[in-house]
Image (cartoon, rainbow, N blue to C red):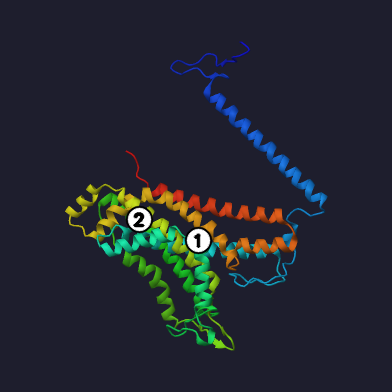
Amino acid sequence: MSDSNVTVTKAATPPGQAAFHLSINNPVVRAILAQLGVALAVALVAWYLVGNTMDNLARLSIASGFGFLDREAGFQIGETLIEFGPQDHYSTAFLVGILNTLKVSGIGILLATLLGVVLGIARLSSNWLVARIAAFYVETVRNVPLLLQLFLWYGLLTEGLPGPRQALSPLPGIFLSNRGLKLPAPADDPIWAWVAALFGLGVILTLVITAWNAKRQAATGKRLSMLPIGLGLILGLPLSVLLASGGGAIDMPVLQGFNFRGGMTLSPEFAALLFGLVIYTAAFIGEIVRSGILAVPKGQTEAATALGLTRGQVLRLVVLPQALRVIIPPTTSQFLNLTKNSSLAVAIGYPDFVSIANTTINQTGQAVEGVLAIMAAYLVISLSLSFLMNWYNSRVALVER
């Protein structure tokens, strides 16, 4: 044993196994020690910052902790998915904000994906005009800041549309004005609960049959057409019950005074935020889809064409399944960006989680706790979305033989 080199060797090493050496000169040991040193330094810095913050809060007589969540909020939220009033607690207000963020993010991800796929395919179209229009859209939208686009959409929806009395009515029961889009909504009728339950059951059954169909195809080479089966289960089951019951009650919007009553409302703030997020994110997803399609060797397309498949079948059955392994990872980043960009809703008045947390901070003075709540909420949402996308990516990734 020396001062510069400490070595511990396992005694009586079995034949055929390498001896285990624990040495300071071992690169693995040095790497572990370096990581421990960095972790210790981070812990010390965090301890100093937390301690300094707590001392400053105590010196300024500012209460700390999350006890304020049990206090009465005292403010109204204009757009909620659950019932909320000024008498409810701040914790309920936070829940409303999270649900609003999830609503706009979930719908935005779905619509941005559909539009992005269309744009990516259109950019590779053999039609010169279609390809150039798609290219112009992508290059223009990607290079304009999202915040400016949100202001544009909000201005068009609030200033460019008429008032409720002169509202546009493209279809009976649908009214478009600067107060938002009014639509008929299901009334308080038990049949709608059955319709929703059967819709969910149809989705689950479709997923189960799709998985079974894929295994059947791998084993026998035969597959069922899932489009009519899926439509029959997802739409057929709820519609059959709805028709058998004679239809459910509908709450129709009606103009009363200076605004509409009844129905459901798509507010200008929600619409502007949704349009901005979808149009902006779809431009990036379109480029990802285009690059993924170009990554598939042309021989695959030529072989599929030689087998007699149509252009649509080649794209759906041959090209896109192989392109997914290239498309999904960067698309996951765009989904995360869309979710985080929804925090710009505060600029146009949509009550997302950041907006409600800011109101809470202004009323309670709990700035540290409010910011921590915002960070924790977006961290949980982002990690959950990443987990789901990574799981899906592992299902569609090519397996090396």
Q: Secondary structure at mark 1?
A: helix
Locate residue 47, reporting x and y percent: 71, 40
* Image: 149 above or below 170: above
At a point 40% along the width and 72% down the height, the residue shown is 237
Q: Is residue 351 left or right of residue 111?
A: right
Residue to which mark 2 is pinned: 212
Residue at 33% across, 66% down: 229
Q: Disc 2 and disc 1: Cα gap in Å?
A: 43 Å
Residue at the outermost top position: 1
Task: Tell me the residue at 31%/52% (across/down).
Answer: 293
Q: Sequence order check: which comes first, mark 2 or mark 1?
A: 1
- Indicate the position of residue 162 as horizontal and vertical percent values: 51, 82
Mark 2 lies on a secondary structure that is helix
The answer to whether residue 206 shows anywhere in this view is no
Residue 117 visible? The answer is: yes
Mark number displayed over residue 188: none
